[in-house]
Image (cartoon, rainbow, N blue to C red):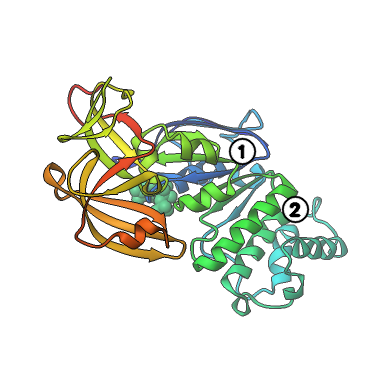
Amino acid sequence: MSIQVQNIHKAFGDFVALDNLTLDFPGGELVALLGPSGCGKTTLLRVIAGLEQADSGRVLLDGEDASDTHVRERQVGFVFQHYALFRHMTVFDNVAFGLRMKPRKLRPSEADIKRKVHELLDLVQLDWLADRFPAQLSGGQRQRIALARALAVEPRVLLLDEPFGALDAKVRKELRRWLRRLHDELHITSIFVTHDQEEALEVADRVVLMNHGRVEQIGSPGEVYRQPATPFVYGFLGAANRFEGSGSAGGIAVGNARLSSEPAAYDGRVIAFVRPHELDIVPGEHGDGVPARISRLLTLGALTRVELEGRDELAGQQFDVELPAGSELVASLQAGQPVRLKPRSVRVFANQETAGAA
Ligand code: ATP
């Protein structure tokens, strides 16, 4: 089922949670709503579900205005961060719940319910837990059961609000791969909320980046990562070194140093971002590049992260460089050493924070 959100506005008192938002979710995709805490992700999910009334705008489900359609009739399945399983019911009864609650005319027979519940438990690979109670399950198992329960009523849309947020890192990683495979099998239009960029990039067909109740960018994981549309997106998707400088046909100047000699995309004040793995370190105090000094070296498995501080006019600014651990260069570096930084790839934005920006 496709979902269109048209000019949705939602305020809580003076606070604007959704700011005239327009979005198009084609049917069958797994979409991540990604953004910092408080940017309106959950509110958007609740408006789509019909749990929250927007102040203005409309939600279309398969092209039809859903404004007057009750939550129960929207055929939406939910999974929340905090497992909402009934504690006094077995796993089987939890999954059967939605089917047993159907109006008498639509309710399947107990034999059909039994077959369906076992099918769903098979799908989430937990049929062997059918007779347990939620307290006897791990967090990851509970979330898979919650998903089976949401799927029981054959929803046309699945809405997942930080479904793995309460789980530890390892289980989280396993479950997001599992969700991807499950979606490949079922192809139900699914929207999941996360503030974890790695999770969004790894799992989703499409990522919607939100900030302050607005959409900053929509794209495939590759697009939003490689071609971030705004400084916010760049900063949010992965650590980035940020340089403020001025752009011209001669390149980008940062203080007295030259960050890049390629003609800049903007004239005047710019913000330039460089990812930690795209910044080279050249030992030595003087010469080309941005002057910095190594603060410390951290070994992170296959990578060494070099933390640096700017020198001269860039004193007080922090930078990070990631290098393959065990390389000759890494072995030669030490804390306190003056170096220069040279980017291999720079992403430049006009500096809107300064008057007269291009
Ligand atoms: P998080 O990742 O922290 O869950 P979010 O992006 O999902 O954040 P929302 O839960 O949509 O954000 O909330 C957006 C903003 O609206 C927040 O500042 C929140 O405090 C506010 N808000 C949400 N619901 C209500 C409410 N019922 N009454 C008042 N303010 C609310």
User: Is residue 288 placed above or below 284 in the rendered structure?
Assistant: above
Locate residue 29 relative to residue 339 in the image: left or right.
Answer: right
User: Is residue 273 placed above or below 91 in the rendered structure?
Assistant: above
Q: Is residue 76 visible?
A: yes
Q: Is residue 17 visible?
A: no
- Callout 1: 10 Å neighbours few (<14), some, many (20+)? few
Quadrant of the frame with the N terminus: top right
* Measured Cα–Cα span from mark 2 to mark 1: 17 Å
Q: Is mark 2 within 8 Å of ligand 1?
A: no
User: Is residue 137 placed above or below 235 in the rendered structure?
Assistant: below
Tell me residue 311's x, y (percent).
15, 48
Tell me residue 60's x, y (percent).
59, 31
Figure quadrant of residue 323: bottom left
Report the residue at 49% width, 65% height from top: 166
Tell me residue 80's x, y (percent).
54, 58
Report the residue at 20% width, 40% height from top: 287
Q: Are marks 2 and 1 in contact (CB under 8 Å)?
A: no
**Residue position for label 1:** 69
- Callout 2: 10 Å neighbours few (<14), some, many (20+)? few
Q: Amino acid at mark 2?
A: Pro
Q: Amino acid at mark 1?
A: Thr
Residue nearest the observer in this picture, 85 or 136: 136
Residue nearest the observer in this picture, 213 or 225: 225
Q: Is mark 1 within 8 Å of ligand 1?
A: no
- Name the outermost residue toward the right: 111
**Residue position for label 2:** 103
Report the residue at 56% width, 50% height from top: 202
What kind of element bears circle 2?
A: loop
What kind of element bears circle 1?
A: loop
Quadrant of the frame with the C terminus: top left
- Name the outermost residue toward the left: 312
